[in-house]
Amino acid sequence: MELWDILNAKGEPMGRTAVRGSSTLRSGEYHLVVHIWPVNEYGSLLIQKRSKTKRLMPGIWAATGGAAISGESSFTAAARELYEELGIPSSEESLRFVTRIKRRNSFVDVWTIKTKAKVPELKLQKSEVAEAKWVNKATLLNMIQNGEYHNYGKEYFEHIWQLVEKTKNS
């Protein structure tokens, strides 16, 4: 049983929890989700294809990440998800916060990590991830347009494109 902290509209804990999958968040209640974008020195993004056994978006390419467990900080959740799903270790120095986006019933904290990870060396969490690959912006845009990659929305991807440009220029 996974518990989530319930947050108010400002992203502050309300002192209550919800059980994943069996609790419905009311209007004005949110939970924390983290997305992690591994980026290499060329500005390519490491994306993952969700396992076909996933209840939500099975077999779809999407961002690495998931829900924060009750008591976890955004950083702790991001580091855990990155390591669990792809086997990429991180630290407070390597994992960088990008932005927080308020959704219908969640706050999505977007993180990035610069890495030279090689796909064949990744340790994929088979229950979550079917495969992973490096893509450039043009390829990802094409995947979004043809429905292969989950479309998180214009505001979300504006942050990701800025991230790609910063990485290429650093």
Image (cartoon, rainbow, N blue to C red):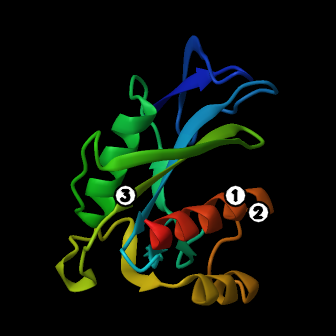
Can residue 61 be seen by looking at this rendering?
yes
Q: In this view, does 128 lie to the left or right of 11?
A: left
Q: Quadrant of the C terminus?
A: bottom left
Q: Which of marks 3 and 1 is in front?
A: 3
> Residue 150 versus residue 141: which sits nearer the camera?
141
Which residue appears farthest toward the top when viewing the image?
Answer: 15
Secondary structure beneath dot 2 equals: loop
Q: Quadrant of the N terminus?
A: top left
Few, some or many C-alpha atoms within 10 Å of disc 2 (few <14, some 14-19, many ≥20)? few
Quadrant assignment, res 145: bottom right
Whole-angstrom CA distance, mark 3 to mark 1, is 17 Å
Q: Name the residue: 59% across, 89% down.
A: 139
Work out whether mark 3 precedes mark 2 in sequence or the reverse, and give the earlier one: 3
Circles 2 and 1, Cβ within 8 Å, touching? The answer is: yes
Q: How many marks?
A: 3
Circles 3 and 2, Cβ within 8 Å, touching? The answer is: no
Residue 156, which numbered label? 1
Looking at the picture, does residue 4 appear above or below residue 44?
above
The x and y percentages for residue 24 are 69, 33
Amino acid type at circle 2 is: Gly
Amino acid type at circle 3 is: Ile
Circles 3 and 1, Cβ within 8 Å, touching? The answer is: no
Residue 153, which numbered label? 2
Whole-angstrom CA distance, mark 2 to mark 1, is 5 Å
Secondary structure beneath dot 3 equals: strand
Residue 113, which numbered label? 3
Amino acid type at circle 1 is: Tyr
Q: Is residue 143 left or right of residue 115?
A: right
Secondary structure beneath dot 1 equals: helix
Looking at the picture, does residue 119 appear above or below residue 85?
below
